[in-house]
Image (cartoon, grey):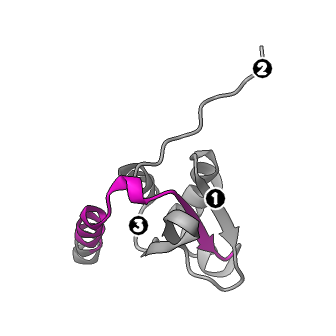
């Protein structure tokens, strides 16, 4: 519990360091299995929620721990946030707090 509180405090503190206008896009870097299979909450976020956010992509890298990589102009890396200690809800709250919104439904009539 203490670790989760510390993680959330770090997230909130670093959020203040960047204006949302500095963040152009983001990607989640993670392995497809291995560590992700040991993190069912994060896996559900990566597989079921992340694909529906605008300007957020998922990149599978063998052996990589799940991280949110915030990008600025020219794909300049602004920040990396480890997701392994977060719940599915906390992952969603994190990307929403950084200014990412879900894609609008584009169903054809």
**Residue matched to label 3:** 86
- For the point 58% across and 67% down, the residue is 74
The magenta stretch spans which residues? 7-31
Q: Is mark 2 on a helix, strand or loop?
A: loop
Above/below status of 26 relative to 50: below
Q: Which of 75 and 3 is in front in this view?
A: 75
Q: Which of the two labelled residues, at mark 1 and mark 3, occupies the earlier sequence position?
A: 1
- Asked whether the viewer can see residue 90, the reply is no
| Quarter of the rendering containing residue 6 | bottom left
**Position in image of residue 60 (x %, y %):** 70, 72
Q: Which of the two labelled residues, at mark 2 and mark 1, occupies the earlier sequence position?
A: 1
- For the point 62% across and 51% down, the residue is 48
Residue lying farthest to the right in this orientation: 108
How packed mark 1 is, by other alpha carbons closer than 10 Å (few <14, some 14-19, many 20 or more), is some
**Residue matched to label 2:** 108
**Residue matched to label 1:** 57
Q: Distance between the residues labelled 3 and 2?
A: 36 Å
């Amino acid at each position: 519990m203490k670790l989760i509180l510390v993680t959330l405090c770090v997230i909130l503190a670093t959020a203040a360091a960047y204006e949302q206008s500095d963040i152009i896009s983001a990607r989640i870097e993670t392995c497809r299995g291995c560590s992700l299979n040991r993190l069912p909450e994060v896996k559900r976020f990566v597989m079921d929620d992340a694909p529906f956010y605008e300007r957020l992509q998922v990149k599978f890298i063998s052996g990589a721990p799940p991280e949110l990589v915030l990008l600025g102009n020219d794909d300049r890396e602004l920040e990396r946030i480890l997701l392994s200690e977060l719940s599915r809800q906390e992952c969603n709250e994190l990307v929403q707090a950084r200014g990412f919104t879900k894609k609008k439904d584009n169903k054809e009539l």
